[in-house]
Amino acid sequence: PPPRSGEDLRKDFPGLTPGWHYLDTAATAQKPQAVIDATVAAMGRDYATVHRGVYARSADMTLAYEAARRRIAGFIGAREEQVAFVRGATEAINLVAYAHPKKGRVLLSVLEHHSNIVPWQLAGWQVDVCPLTDDGRIDLDAAERLLTSEHNMVALAHVSNVLGSPLDVARAADLAHRVGAELLIDGCQAVPRLPVDVSALGCDYYAFSGHKLYGPTGVGVLWSDKLDALPPWQGGGSMIDRVTFAKTTYAPAPTRFEAGTPAIIEALGLAAAVDYVDAIGLDAIHAHECALVGRLREALARKNSVRLFGPENSAGIVSFAMAGVHPHDIGTILDESGVAIRAGHHCAQPLMEHLGVPATARASFGLYSNEDDVTALIEGLARVERIFG
Ligand code: PMP
């Protein structure tokens, strides 16, 4: 089929109501009708449990669930047995932090989301922190100096949820592996905006959430080519081989990590989202978002009252502050003009401290964002300037 234009794509998203400028896709993406239809069918006509039933409907659902796993694995260049369904990136990172047999030292960075900080602390890892470059990228030269043979893990965001900074994952993997550490990548913000091929990146674990990839909430992925080396984390139904009171043995990965009835409907919805995104192409989505980021950064740079954060090549995300105006006030005034941005610490309080601000205003784009959204934001900010004098 011929490539579809942005306006054409917007019609696929019932959540994009007329006159509303949704600039919070980094928090969660709107859902295309194809994803809604897939979840409705999975919850209605096709609904049954997986892995248990002997009747045809359940067998069909099991096939569909495993086909969803295969589809999502293929989308990131992986094999199906390397993909565990989890609730989201948060659960994926908790899983590795808790299940890992060597809970030693982990190197994180200043810009990490709380979900890539707190699990390591809770699970008892010793946390070291890599600084950022002046333009807000993870400073891999500093990481090279900080890493020692005592580190067993490096855990970094592929794309920052606040600054949009993309990471050179191949170099990070090389640095981690040189000292014998593994690399976990938090791919939450990368998977919806950059082509991701885990087999080429060189990382050991890759985590992401379905709802940021235009899929449902409640499902996400932990990829690893060494899932078999991880002991189980949560116990329950489905994850076992044989249970006795004397000794329990476990199913092979990835089933070993899917205790209990899984998010069946959501997994099928995520596979539909992957189909949808793939049909447009991540190269096209990335180019589209880069053009919008360029336009917005240029317009913001012209405003004297605005402080702009993050590097020029931010992927889909632009954070800023306005002199004398709290980001919450910016967000509230913009909302009155039908412009939805995020204002706050974005679950990255150490980064806010590093930037010397309590919060930022953040605009983030998706495949359906357009120039009108940017114009509405800029006009809304002019109104903020008028109100605050
Ligand atoms: N990491 C990053 C970079 C994120 O942007 C988010 C979501 N804001 C998360 C992790 C956590 O994702 P979830 O809440 O879907 O588990």
Image (cartoon, grey):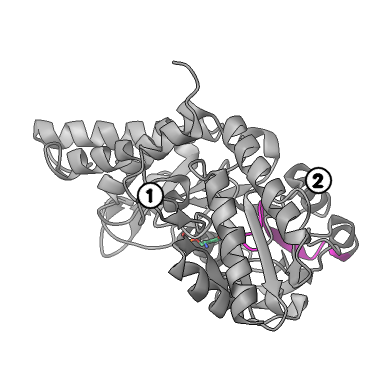
The answer to whether residue 340 shows anywhere in this view is yes
Residues in magenta, as a range: 146-162
Q: Position of residue 135 (x, y in %)?
A: 82, 61
Q: Position of residue 318 (x, y in %)?
A: 66, 58
Q: Which residue is mark 1?
A: 16
- SS under mark 1: loop
Residue 370 relative to residue 265: left or right: right
Vertical side of 265 occupied by 186: above or below: below
Q: Residue furthest left?
A: 55
Single out the mark in the foreground, 1 or 2.
1
Instruction: Using the image as rendered, state which of residue 97 and residue 43 is in the foreground.
Output: 43
Q: Position of residue 345 (x, y in %)?
A: 60, 75
At horizontal 64% and vertical 45% (from top left) the residue drawn is 292
Q: Which residue is mark 2?
A: 171
Instruction: Using the image as rendered, state which of residue 197 and residue 36 is in the foreground.
Output: 36
The quadrant of the picture occupied by the C terminus is bottom right
Q: Amino acid at mark 2?
A: Arg
Vertical side of 350 occupied by 42: above or below: above
Q: Amino acid at mark 1?
A: Leu
Q: Quadrant of residue 53?
A: top left
Residue 58 relative to residue 66: left or right: left
Q: Position of residue 172 (x, y in %)?
A: 77, 50
Q: Name the N-terminal-most of marks 1 and 2.
A: 1
* Alpha carbons under labels 1 and 2: distance apart: 38 Å
The answer to whether residue 101 shows anywhere in this view is no
